Image (tube, grey):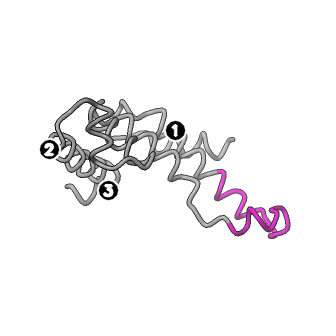
């Protein structure tokens, strides 16, 4: 916990988006926890199932943070796409024309990508 608090204090000046403060704190805390576990772990603490899990634990924090910053229409189409709906089903669910759903989905993906990779947009 102390390592996380120190990292938050040291990195506070690098926070660019004040609205994303809580997501940023979670991200820093998870990153520091992972670093601490890696530093202290001898490899026997995790079960084989957990050891095979390849995804980055920070992704879940970042995805929620990025989605919260998107507009409601963009968040809606991305969420429906994640639930497996195709464009026609999204149009029916949202009571929108198919072309509107397609353009919204395109813009939502672009906005999500710009927020996910902020250095690429700069």
Residue at 46 percent of width and 40 percent of height: 64
Who comes first in sequence, dot 2 or dot 1?
1
**Tag 3 and tag 1, C-beta contact below 8 Å:** no
Q: What is the quadrant of the N terminus in the image?
A: top right
Residue 30 in the image, given as x and y percentages of width and height:
60, 48
Residue in the picture at 27% in, 45% down: 88
- Residue at mark 2: 99
Quarter of the image with the C terminus is bottom left
Vertical side of 53 occupied by 65: above or below = above
Helix, strand or loop status at disc 2? helix
Q: Residues within 10 Å of mark 2 (few under 14, many from 20)?
A: few
Q: Is residue 95 above or below residue 38?
A: above
Reading the image, the residue beneath label 3 is 117
Tell me the CA gap for discs 2 and 1. 39 Å
Magenta span contains residue 35: yes
Structural crowding at the residue carrying mark 1, measured as other residues with C-alpha within 10 Å and reported as few (<14), some (14–19) or many (≥20) = many
Query: What element does badge 1 sit on?
Result: helix
Q: With 58 as the anchor, is 19 left or right in this view? A: left
Residue closer to the observer: 52 or 9: 52
Residue tagged 1: 25
> Measured from the top left, where is residue 77 in percent x and y?
31, 40
Q: On the rendered structure, is 80 left or right of 99?
A: right
Please state if 43 lies on the left or on the right of 52 as rendered: right
For the residues labelled 3 and 1, the Cα–Cα distance comes to 18 Å
Q: Within 10 Å of the Cα at label 3, are there few (<14), some (14-19), or many (20+) other Cα atoms?
A: few
Q: How many numbered tags mark residues here?
A: 3
Q: Is residue 19 magenta?
A: no
- Residue occupying the point 25% across, 45% down: 108
| Rendered image quadrant of residue 46 | bottom right
Task: Determine the secondary structure under disc 3.
Answer: loop
Mark 2 or mark 3: name the one nearer the start of the chain.
2
Find the magenta span and give its range.
Answer: 33-52
């Amino acid at each position: 916990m102390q390592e996380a608090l120190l990292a938050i204090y040291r990195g506070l000046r690098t926070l660019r988006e004040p609205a994303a403060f809580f997501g940023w704190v979670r991200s820093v805390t998870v990153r520091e926890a992972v670093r601490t576990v890696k530093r202290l772990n001898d490899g026997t603490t995790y079960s084989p199932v957990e050891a095979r899990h390849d995804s980055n634990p920070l992704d879940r924090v970042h995805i929620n943070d990025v989605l919260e910053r998107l507009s409601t229409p963009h968040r809606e189409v991305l969420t429906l796409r994640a639930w497996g709906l195709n464009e026609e089903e999204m149009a029916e669910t949202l009571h929108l024309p198919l072309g509107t759903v397609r353009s919204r989905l395109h813009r939502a993906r672009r906005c999500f990508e710009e927020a996910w990779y902020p250095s690429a947009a700069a």
